[in-house]
Amino acid sequence: MNQLMLDLQQYGPWLVTHKGDRSCRLLADRHYSRQTPGADMFCRPGRNLVLRTAWGDAVWVTWDGIRDDGLRAWECTIFRNESPHLSSDLVVAATYATVKEWGEPPPDGIITYVDARKIRSVNPGCCFKAAGWRSIGTSKRRGLALLQWKGVMPN
């Protein structure tokens, strides 16, 4: 009997999927940034790299589109981890996956915004910081913590 094999690109625990992935959508519905829970699409218009774990218990999306913050960067628009994996390890692997899939980041690297008022951590973005990202300020409109990765990835 033949076993069905799927040709999925994999980066550590992450699998590359699509912006209609049901497991990712359900995780996004539980994320504080979700604007329309239950909507079929959970990604912004533009180019999106959607990653999920095999069990569908973690999601990451890197977005590339028209920015209104003046930065020339890709953005992690959602990261939710309900898996047993350490969040900082997932951030490292997702950052690596983004660079391997898309190539050299724009001049301002890869960024993410964190709403300190909507998380339980006393150190907003702690898992990103532990993964080599650094705090570079706050957003102008909503005062969100702004984190950036401008590192070098191993081959």
Image: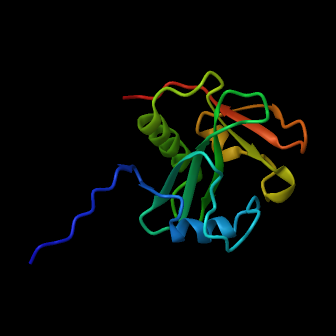
Question: Residue 15 placed where, x, y %?
Answer: 41, 55
Residue positioned 69% across, 69% down in the render? 30
**Vertical placement of residue 2 versus 90, above or below:** below
Residue positioned 45% across, 30% down in the render? 103
> Quarter holding the N terminus?
bottom left
Q: Nearer the viewer, residue 102 or 14?
A: 102
The tally of labels here is: 0
- Image quadrant in which you'd find residue 59: bottom right
Question: Residue 57 placed where, x, y %?
Answer: 53, 67
> Quarter holding the C terminus?
top left
Question: Residue 106 placed where, x, y %?
Answer: 59, 25
**Vertical placement of residue 60 versus 75, above or below:** below
**Vertical placement of residue 13 versus 95, above or below:** below
Residue 116 appears left or right of 103: right
Question: Residue 58 placed where, x, y %?
Answer: 54, 61
Residue positioned 83% across, 58% down in the render? 118
Residue 10 appears left or right of 20: left
Residue positioned 67% across, 70% down in the render? 39
Residue 76 appears left or right of 4: right
